[in-house]
Amino acid sequence: MVGFLGDFDRAEEAAQEAFAIAAERWPRTGTPENPAAWLIVTARNRAIDRIRRDRKIQPHGELPDVPDTVQELPDEQSEFPDERLELFFTCAHPSLSLEAQVALTLRAVGGLSTPEIARAFLVSEPTMAQRLVRAKRKISSAGIPFRIPPAHLLPDRLAAVLTVVYLIFNEGYDGRAGLAGEAIRLGASLAETMPDEPEVNALLALMLLTEARRPARFHDGELVLLADQDRGLWDERMLRSGREALARARALQSSAPPGPYLVQAEIAALHASGEQRWPQIVERYGQLAAITGSPVVELNRAVAIAESEGAAAGLAATEGLDLDGYHYLHSTRADLLRRLGRAGEARLAYERALELVRTEPERRFLERRLAEL
Amino acid sequence: MEYLIQIYTGGAMEAWERLSESEKDSVSQEYFTISDEPGVNGGAQLQPPDTATTVRVQDGRTLTTDGPFAETKEALGGYYLLEAADLDAAIELAGRIPAARMGGAVEVRPLVPR
């Protein structure tokens, strides 16, 4: 509908009207033979009527060009174009701000309500509503095309879509579970419509392999360290799906160098193998650091080095990382200094981490460690 | 869709000064080539910001000040009027404007249809 009308709001209105008519009429007249087709044709015709009425009021405004009516019922096979991919790419267009991309993807692709999205990102409902309105307005005013990008733009545009989905996975907050489930649904939808893209499958694998282990990360609201986590709490079905997606990603990537999501999925798979595979994890983080140049990745590598080669080697690997405002740098250094018996330095590092920490479970964990020194 | 492509020279002016004569010719030629493209319905380089005059009217009196409206280093350097199928096409053209890679910036803004 959006492709037909070039406008999110009109598409939504028209769809709602068609459903309302169906809900009222079908109990009396019986369900039509092809209900989906009926709904689409009705929605289109309602939209056309509405546009014609609006044209009379505003003769020279920016209204979509539409045929007079849509009469024939489309046949079984045809044109219910699955617009999911077009929606994904439109919502993640680089001319929209990242927060607008995230909000719009959740609304238009995920079907979440505005209040749900507002809650997930800890903003007020009016703020989120405004964000969505502005984003939709920009799409129509600036002429953001509703399509799958042409080949020369596709790599960058797909990367943007994946960024949005992964951001939703990591940042969406909804009590304890977060928007992880929503992100996985989006990732699965993307994998269904772009099955031959290795990074698409890899992202899905990464999210499944990570989410499957969530139940073990907290106990009574308190953080549980990796080494102490109860593997019995892992979601085996999710792990299986994740491993399948990873296998597909590997097969699609074949001998070409892996992309960042594939490397991260490999790391998640190593963690989920239930065995201590730290040297391999060190290597994978090295691979990821080379791809992304990210100091956060280097920090993760340092943690893996500490597990693989000891605290002194791990501490050395944290030297010179430009992450002073990042609490994990300080909590990591604190932990390694503590293990090396350097209590005074560990205290300073815990205190610095506590200045920067953002969640209550993490704060309590750090305070306990500090008290134990 | 119609767009105004606004070219902000910014740091591009310094980069321009450092070019050789033949490099300057080559860059100028790029601007002319874009001017001649289908869909480009006008365009010009503006004279430097210090040639500008800013006009306001207050209580019926016309007030003029010497210089551009924006900060000199953020003032407009040139423009194109572009008719394009969609924003991606406009962005593609904007990306080819020399100022964009020489330390300046290009703004792509749709016109209000009349």
Image: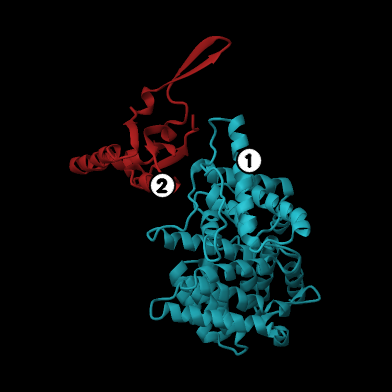
Chain colours: A cyan, B red
Left or right of B4 in this view: A97: right
Disc 2: which chain? B
In the rendered image, residue A39, in percent from the top left (x then y), is placed at 65, 56
In the rendered image, residue A14, in percent from the top left (x then y), is placed at 65, 48
Q: Secondary structure at mark 2?
A: helix
Q: Which mark is residue B91?
A: 2
Left or right of B85 in this view: A85: right
In the rendered image, residue B36, in percent from the top left (x then y), is placed at 27, 37
How many numbered marks are there?
A: 2
The quadrant where residue A233 appears:
bottom right
Q: Amino acid at mark 2?
A: Ile
Figure check: A12 above or below A342: above
Q: Write the residue at 62% across / 76% down.
A: A208
Q: Amino acid at mark 1?
A: Arg
Q: Which mark is residue B15?
A: none
Left or right of A313 in this view: B68: left
Q: Write the residue at 56% across / 63% down.
A: A323
Disc 1: which chain? A
Task: Name the residue at the bottom extreme.
Answer: A275
Figure check: A36 above or below B81: below
Local crowd size for mark 1, using a 10 Å CA cut-off: few (<14), some (14–19), many (≥20) = some
In the rendered image, residue A324, in percent from the top left (x then y), is placed at 58, 62
- Disc 2 with disc 1 on a shared chain: no
Is residue B91 in view from this perspective? yes
In front here: B48 or A159?
A: A159
Q: Nearer the viewer, mark 2 or mark 1?
A: 1
Q: Write the residue at 61% across / 45% down.
A: A47
Is residue B8 in view from this perspective? no
Which residue is identified by label 1?
A50
In front here: A59 or A338?
A: A59
